[in-house]
């Protein structure tokens, strides 16, 4: 760990919120991206990544400084997302985008969604590829999906993944190899059914 990071961890342990904000500043976006890839929903990813950061702050006393802070934090993010997904699968709430938002005393607001689309052909191909990969990822079990996300989507090194998942390097490599094979089979089957 860098000396500045060690100092920020120590200050965070003493309850310094500004030090904690600085400590996690460079990691927040990746935490959100991991949450989004696991949960595949913007609102859920925001909620889960926020919940994970609160857990990190509350449990920073338990960080032993032997591993990197980044790996320790992402382990909490992963576990929080998995827990969040389990809870969500138990209760599903739906909100209509056509339904007005009641603000009480004033007149209701009508929901509008901005169209920030570009060239239709490019968007169709991009969306098709993205949907195909996301659908294939969703068919993998959590452990398999997580290792693909960490390595192939987020670009973590094998040693970082080893720390995040609390397993040895050989296990990471074999799990990743198996996960890629599974993902490839799913994608091949999906493409066959598309043709």
Image: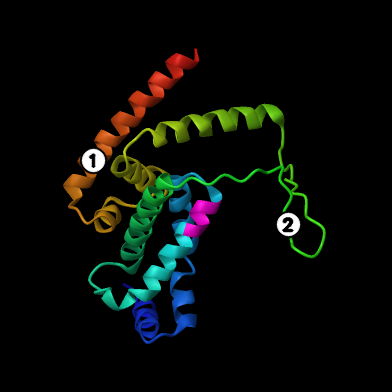
Magenta region includes residue 154: no
Relative to residue 175, is residue 132 depicted above or below? above
- Is 59 or 22 nearer to us in this picture? 59
Q: Is residue 174 above or below residue 10?
A: above
Which of marks 2 and 1 precedes in the sequence? Answer: 2
What is the x, y in percent for residue 174? 20, 39
Q: Are marks 1 and 2 in contact (CB under 8 Å)?
A: no
Residue found farthest to the right: 107
Of tags 1 and 2, which is closer to the observer?
A: 2
Q: Is residue 184 left or right of residue 194?
A: left
Residue annotated with mark 1: 175
Tag 1: Cα neighbours inside 10 Å, few (<14), some, or many (≥20)?
A: some
Above or below, 148 against 6 in this view is above
CA–CA distance in space, label 1 to label 2: 49 Å
Q: Which residue, as the protein is rendered here, is positioned at the far bottom?
A: 14
Q: Residue 58, how many percent across, how many down? A: 37, 75
Which secondary structure, mark 1? helix
Could you tell me if residue 27 is visible in this image? no
Categorize mark 2 by other alpha carbons within 10 Å: few (<14), some (14-19), many (20+): few
Q: Residue at x 50, y 59 (%)?
A: 47
Whether residue 71 is visible to the viewer of this picture, yes or no, is yes
Q: Nearer the viewer, residue 92 or 164?
A: 92
Name the colour scheme.
rainbow
Horizontally, residue 143 falls left or right of residue 104, namely: left
Taking the image as shown, residue 123 lies to the left or right of residue 71, namely right
Near-viewer residue (51 or 187): 51
Q: Which residue is mark 2?
A: 102
* Residue 183: quadrant of the picture: top left
Image coordinates of residue 131 in percent, x first then y, are: 52, 32
Q: Which residues are magenta?
A: 43-47
Q: Position of residue 65 (x, y in %)?
A: 26, 74
């Amino acid at each position: 760990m860098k000396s500045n990071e060690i100092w920020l961890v120590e200050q965070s342990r003493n309850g310094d919120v500004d030090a904690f904000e600085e400590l996690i500043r460079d990691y927040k976006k990746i935490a959100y991206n991991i949450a989004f890839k696991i949960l595949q929903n913007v609102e859920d990813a925001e909620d889960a990544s926020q919940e994970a950061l609160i857990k990190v702050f509350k449990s920073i006393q338990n960080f032993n400084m032997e591993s990197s802070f980044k790996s320790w934090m992402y382990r909490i993010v992963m576990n929080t997302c998995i827990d969040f997904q389990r809870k969500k699968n138990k209760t599903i709430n739906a909100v209509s985008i056509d339904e007005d938002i009641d603000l009480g005393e004033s007149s209701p607001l009508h929901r509008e969604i901005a169209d920030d689309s570009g060239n239709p052909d490019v968007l169709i191909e991009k969306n098709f590829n993205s949907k195909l990969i996301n659908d294939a990822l969703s068919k993998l079990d959590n452990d398999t999906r997580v290792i693909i996300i960490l390595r192939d989507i987020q670009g973590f090194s094998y040693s970082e993944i080893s720390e995040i998942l609390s397993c040895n390097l050989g296990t990471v490599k074999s799990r990743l190899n198996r996960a890629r094979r599974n993902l490839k089979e799913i994608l091949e089957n999906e493409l066959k059914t598309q043709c």
